[in-house]
Image (cartoon, rainbow, N blue to C red):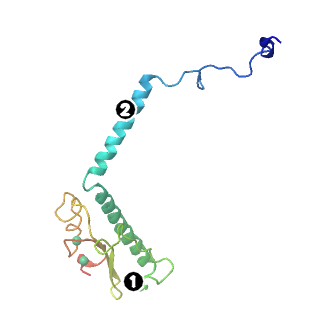
Amino acid sequence: MDKRSLFAHGPALVESRPWRGVAGKQGFSLLEVFVIVGALVILGALIFLLLGKTDFLAELRDSQRISDLNRFRADLNSYLSANPNVNICDRTSGDNFPKFPVDPINDGEYKYSYACDKTLKTFEINAKMESARYAQGGSDDMESTDGGNQPDVYEAGNASGLSL
Ligand SMILES: [Ca+2]
Ligand SMILES: [Ca+2]
């Protein structure tokens, strides 16, 4: 039997040719590869620099603390306006009593503390700043410029002089 006759039945089912991609282009050009690698290197360097900055994550947590305390103060003031007879020292009083925020670290050193006077309807919520920037003496000192009586914590509330 002629060997060629076994393989000579019509066109081959599978053709072998280079992959041409969706738009008919053949893979990536060297320039495209360089641009992508360059962008990844720059992105990696930026992340490395930001995370390497000593206080970057501490500043993020402090921003969260400042936001938490200011929001709680606003929420509780609104709640007090709507419920003037509420016992401000009983956080379980009323279904709409503002949710007490939790410090991003919440350990022995960094935690929120709450003080209140149920007769005067005054309250204060405090947090310890973690970064040099927001701590007492820092470039954006929040602790000693809040109008409170404790220069080494950030105080928020409605008590006169934040003296609770
Ligand atoms: Ca203070
Ligand atoms: Ca105080």
Q: Quadrant of the C terminus?
A: bottom left
* Position of residue 18 measured from the top left corner of the image (x, y, whole percent): 59, 20
Q: Is residue 30 above or below residue 123?
A: above
Q: Secondary structure at mark 1?
A: loop
Estimate how packed mark 2 is, as few (under 14), some (14 to 19) or many (20 or more) residues with alpha carbons within 10 Å: few
* Position of residue 54 measured from the top left corner of the image (x, y, whole percent): 24, 54
- Residue farthest to the left? 137
Q: Quadrant of the N terminus?
A: top right
* Position of residue 75 measured from the top left corner of the image (x, y, whole percent): 41, 71
Of residues 145 and 36, the one drawn nearer to the viewer in this rendering: 36
Amino acid type of disc 1?
A: Ile
Of residues 158 and 15, the one drawn nearer to the viewer in this rendering: 15
Q: Residue at x 29, y 78 (%)?
A: 159
Amino acid type of disc 2?
A: Gly
N-terminal of the pair, mark 2 or mark 1, is 2
Q: Residue at x 34, y 37 (%)?
A: 42
Horizontal side of 23 relative to 7 (left or right) equals: left
On the image, numbered disc 1 is attached to which residue? Answer: 88
Mark number, residue 38: 2
Of residues 56 and 100, the one drawn nearer to the viewer in this rendering: 56
Picture quadrant of ligand 1: bottom left
Q: Residue at x 26, y 56 (%)?
A: 55
